[in-house]
Each structure stands twice: as structure tokens, then as C-alpha cells.
Amino acid sequence: MGHKGKVDLKYVSDVAGGYYYKDHLPKLGEHAELQRQESADGHTFQQGDKVKCLLEVDILRQMQEGHGGWNPKMAEYICRIGTVHRITDRGDVRVQYSNNIRWTFHPGALTKVNTFGVGDLVRVLEDMDSVKRLQAGHGEWTDSMTPALGQVGKVLKVYADGDLRVVFGGQTWTFNPACLMAQPVEVDANLMTAENPSESGSTVISVLEKLLSQSTEQDNPSRLVIEAAHGSAAKVRDLVQKYPEKVDIKNQGKTALHVAAHQGHMEVVKVLLQANSSIEVKDEDGDTALHYTAFGNQPEIARLLLSKGANVNLLNNSMCTALHIAVNKGFTEVVRVLSEHAADVNLQDSYGDTPLHDAIAKDFRNIIEILTVVPNIDFTQQNNRGFNLLHHAALKGNKLATEKILARARQLVDVKKEDGFSALHLAALNNHRDVAEILIKEGRCDVNIRNNRNQTPLQLAVTQGHAEIVQLLVSEGADVNVEDEDGDTAMHVALSRQQLTTTMATTEGEGSSLYTRLSGSGLLGNTELNVGAAIACFLAQEGADINYANHKGKSPLDLVTDSAVMQLIKSFSDKHRLQQLQAITCGTGSSSASLRRVHTTPNTMTNLAMPSTPGPSECLICSELALLVLFAPCQHSVACEECAHRMKKCIKCQVTITKKIRQDQTEVDCSPSSENSEQHNLLEQLQSRYRQMEERITCPICIDNQIKLVFQCGHASCIDCSAALKTCPICRQTIRERIQLFV
């Protein structure tokens, strides 16, 4: 191919040629000038395509004139695979590489390396001779691959060089994409069940399979890695004696010690260590041999490497230690070995997660029990989203982790995140009843604790219609008449949330016990209630004020449109009032003066039953009677203002103090200088902005993975969560399109 895509061909004589992409060989005699695209529509390249530049440097330099220009560094990316990031208005192609470098290319300079992605169905060519020829240097050919010829398989992995790992039934092979043809999706659906998740999930496994498929007949130093992968200790010994200086040579980016450690070949590992193989040498991902023992679940190899001086806390490129990896994989014995050798359980990965964060998320019970008893574990460690370990256990509904953490750090029970959410808030919002019960009964948490929007756990449970949690919180003393920042009580919330208008099941489901309890009152009759109305009736029965005005002057009854439901709520409220009067008559109840009534003014300060102002108490520091200061986040009042001024930790629970609040709700100023205060405020603002940016790119469903798919409505999720979605979880629109992001 010559200047501007033109081609000159001169016939000399018949000769065996090489292999070329047909797009680079226009028909002889036809004008080969590349037509400029007015827009990206209809272009031969699309966003996400894998492409290569196969031209010589001089030709590419000439073609780049007027098409993105030329930079000498572009020469380094010739023959490297990139991903089409976008098509410019002029039809040029913007390509992104794995190191996040992007170059703009003339479209004629690029070639698609394959058109397949993970999950695609493909059919292998039937011509054995063609497949054998094409497989050279691309996974190679063995006779055991013969049954795959002409068969349909599923792509498990796309390698960096464009080769594909394909599964056929229970067998997997690596193929050159040129050996494969795209297959329509309507092929036998039973094929979809043949995928082995462990195959598709691990780059390490994929590389090892490629090594094992390589020939062992070659006589060069890189053969050492292949023999180590096969576990051939004698051949490894011969090779390290023949090439002693090549003991750490890499093949497919891995050393012999890496693959032997992963495969558990103890004798090979010992031979390599005797030959002075480096324990700390890293692969391209920053993983050492110890990381590989964690990937491969090899506790005894890990023990051997640690005894030889391996650094147990070495981080890879993702800021993960071997302990992070072992926990993530669920390999209990490797976790035990690493813990015995003083692995730091408080180190955080690139997401800010400690190993226990991972164990909690995946509910690995044995690992949770190992990590929670480590003497120096710090349960206050927060990940990048601000969740300490108790928050994380509550978020994920992990009962065992909640119990173990509370047993050692009960002072965390009422600690809040930056948004004011405590562990009980998180459990209530996510319908984790068992965790909420543990927090209340074993943790003795504040059941009426408020977040930054003045919401209590009860109000959050009502917003989601979690009837079982609502009943638990009310039975444990939750105040049904607390108002949030809008002046709404839990009953306002129950009657105003649109998602609570679904009909409540009468025989099964979460709300069944609540429905049974309401039916037992005899007031329900045959009335069919939705979730919100049923919760409102329950709250009225438990003393919620049906005439309580919010900031807009609206009472809960003002939000009811169904007269039958309104009458029911009044009936349950009257029943509660009657029970109170009977209790007062018997001398066991409280005064009816505490009952609240609606006010015409939107200002709900008049709704509040003002608590009596607490009097002076004894300061635990100076033993003087004084008005004590309230510490946040631990909520302890143990010191007067004078003593509290210089305190950095609460003397009762040893939690770091973030705020000191007087009885009149003003904050004690503890800043040493205005300059330091300004720096602190700036740091907090930057941290807040960073967290907001993180939230924008984090999946709103699992709160773990980054957003990779955008729906036509504008909302988004990660790929794993998207697989089960038919409607958008945010706006409830039917999902018609899923647009993959490559940024």
C-alpha cells in the first residue's frame, strides 16, 4: 500500500505469498483512493472494535498527513492492538491503547483484528489444513482439537494479541480468530450453560493454559517456564544448570517461579529457589510468586516462600497484597497461612477495601472468623465510599461479621458516615432484619439515630416498604412521630412514596406478618391495602399522629385519596387512643397531653414536644458539675467544654472526635488557628468532591463495580448487574438499548 492508500501491483512470477487482509488489496485497475467519511455513521469501524496498524513507519507517516498528524511515538504502537474510542467528524479513527494513550489514525491504516467479544458464539472452520496453518503462533494445533472442527463454541476470553479462548461443551481451546466464523445466537441454547466461570474470570489461568499448550521441544531458555508449568522438576533442574543466568526469564510475562507457585509444583519451586530465582520479581501486573500462591490456592508453597523471606505485604499494581487475593478467591487455608505470618489486615486496595471488606461482601464465613480475631485489626478503616467495616457488614447484610465486629468494637455501633448514615440506617434501608436486630439488641444502638437529612432508620425502612424492619424498629422503641428535614414523619413517607402503591400480598412475602397483625385487629375486613397504606395503618395503631403537620402544613391524611383507606387509618388511630385512655384510667399510661394535633402554620416547631433541658452533670476529667459537651460520632457526653477543648479522642470509647457540640447545639471551635481551619475545610471539600466523582461512576445497584453500560434513559449500571435487568431500577423504563462504555 502506497501514498494515500494507492496500490501499485507488478506481476513478476508465480510465488507463494503471505496472508493479507482483503481490505488492503483493492482490485487491480480500480481507483483505490480512500473516500473520506462525512460522519461516523456507516463507517467500516465502530466504537469498541479491536484494531491494529500493520503498515511500515514511512507509509504510516505519509498517510497521517491531514489525518491526525504524525508523532514519532506512534511508531511504538504499530502492530499493537487498540480499541476504537470514537470516529471523528472527518472519518478518522481515534484509537485507545491499554496504557490509556490515544492516537488518531487514517482509517486506511487500520485493520480489524477480530470482530468477536466475550460471550459471542463462533463456528470453527472445517478445513483441518487451513486451521493448522492459521494456528501457527496462535495457540498452536494438537490432534485433540480435531473434534472442534466445524463445531459451535462460545468465546470465554479475548487475549491481548487478539486470540480467542473458546469453549466447546466442557473443553476449551485457544484459536486464531481467522479460524472462526460468527454464529447466529439462535443456536442450541444448551451451549450457554457450558461456560466455566473459573475459565473466564482469571487472566492467570488463561496465560497458564497458553503456556501448557506450547511445545516443550524447543531448546531455549524460555522453555524453562513451560517445563515449570508442567511440573517437570528434572527438566527444570537441567535447564537452570544449562542457563543459570536465565532462571528468571519470562514467557507470556511470567517467570518459572510464578507458574510453579500457582500450580503447586513444590519440587519445581525448591529447584528454582536453590538456583537463586528471585522471590520478589513481578509480572506486568505487579504480582510476585506469593501473589501467585494466593491465585492458585497453594498454602504450602506460600509457607515455603514466606520462610525464604518473601514480603507478605508486597502490593501489586492494584494495591492488593497476597492476602487481598486469597480473601477475594475464598481460599481459607492461604488466608490462615498469611495471617500466621503477620500479614497486615489493615492495608487497603485501590478501592480502599481491606481484606475483611472483601470477605464481608462475599460472605466467606471461615475467613471472616479468621480476620476478625487478628489482634491489631482496625475496624474503623473506611473504604473510598466511606464505609467502615461495621457499615460494610450492615450494607451487605452480613450477620456473622456484624456479631464479630460488635464483640470487639461495640463503640462503632452509632458511628456515622459523612452523610450521617449509621450501621442501623444501612441495615434498615437494605432490608437486613437480622443485622438490624443484632445492632439493637447486642450493639445497644440508638434506634432513633438521625442522618444528615434528619431521617431515622424507621423512616428509611418505610421509604422502601420493608414491613418486617418497620415492625422490629417500632417494637424496639423507634419514635413513630420523628420528622425529617421536610417535616415528614414516617406516616407521611408511607402515604407519599409512589413505589409503595403496589398491592400487599395477603398470604406470602415480606408484608404477610404485618398484614396478619392488622387483620387480627378486626378493623381491616375485606379491604385490600397497598404496602404504603398497610404500613400507615400499622404506624397509626402504634401511636403515629395522623394530624401531624409537615413543613408544607400537610398532615398524613391530606395525602390519602382513597376514603376507605382514610377511614381505616382513623380507626387504627382511634384504637390506639382508646388503649391509652384505658391505660391512664388504670394508672399505667402516660398523659394524653402528649398527643399531637395539626397546626395551620407550616412551621412544625409547634409540633414538637420539647424535651426538658438536661441539667449539669459531673465531668469525668475535672469532676466538676457542668453542662457536658456531646462528642460526635460516638455520641458520648463525658466532659465539660473546658476539658473537652483539647481532647482528640473520647476517653470512654477511644473513638476519634470529629465534632464537639454544646447543649444549645452550637459547635465548640477546637481549631488551633484560622489558617489550619481553612486548610482542613479545603481538604474536606476536596474529599467530598472526590467521593461525588466516585459515586457518579459507581454502579448504583451493587455499589462495588464501575459503571460500564448506559441505558437509553440515561441511567447506568455495571455489566454484572445489567444482565438481570429488564427495566431501569431508577426510572422503571423498559430497557431497550445497552450502550457499553470504554472510557
Image: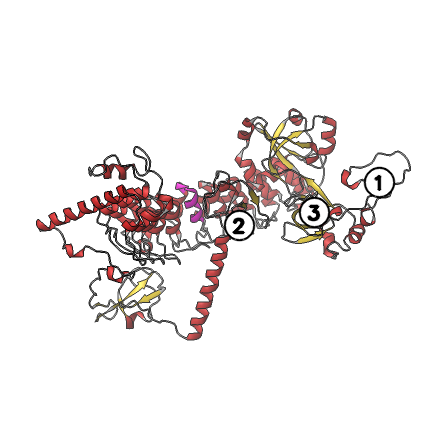
735 is within the stretch colored magenta: no
The label on residue 30 is 1
The segment highlighted magenta reads 355-366
Query: Which residue extends farthest left?
Result: 586
Tell me where residue 638 appears, x and y as whole percent: 26, 65
Tell me the chief SS of the magenta region: helix
Residue 391 shown left or right of residue 1 in the figure:
left
Tell me where residue 170 appears, x and y as whole percent: 56, 28
Badge 3: residue crowd in 10 Å (few <14, some 14–19, many ≥20): some
Residue hosting label 3: 80
Using the image, determine if residue 645 lies above or below residue 232: below
Q: Amino acid at mark 2?
A: Ala
* Nearer mark to the viewer, of 2 and 1: 1
> Mark 2 and 1 residues: CB-CB less than 8 Å, in contact?
no
Mark 2 vs mark 3, CA separation in Å:
35 Å
Q: Secondary structure at mark 3?
A: loop
Tell me where residue 387 appears, x and y as whole percent: 41, 53
The tag earlier along the polypeptide, 1 or 3, is 1
The quadrant of the picture occupied by the N terminus is top right
Tell me where residue 341 appears, x and y as whole percent: 45, 49
Picture colour scheme:
secondary structure
Q: Secondary structure at mark 1?
A: loop
The tag earlier along the polypeptide, 2 or 3, is 3
Q: Amino acid at mark 3?
A: Arg
Q: Is residue 71 visible?
A: yes
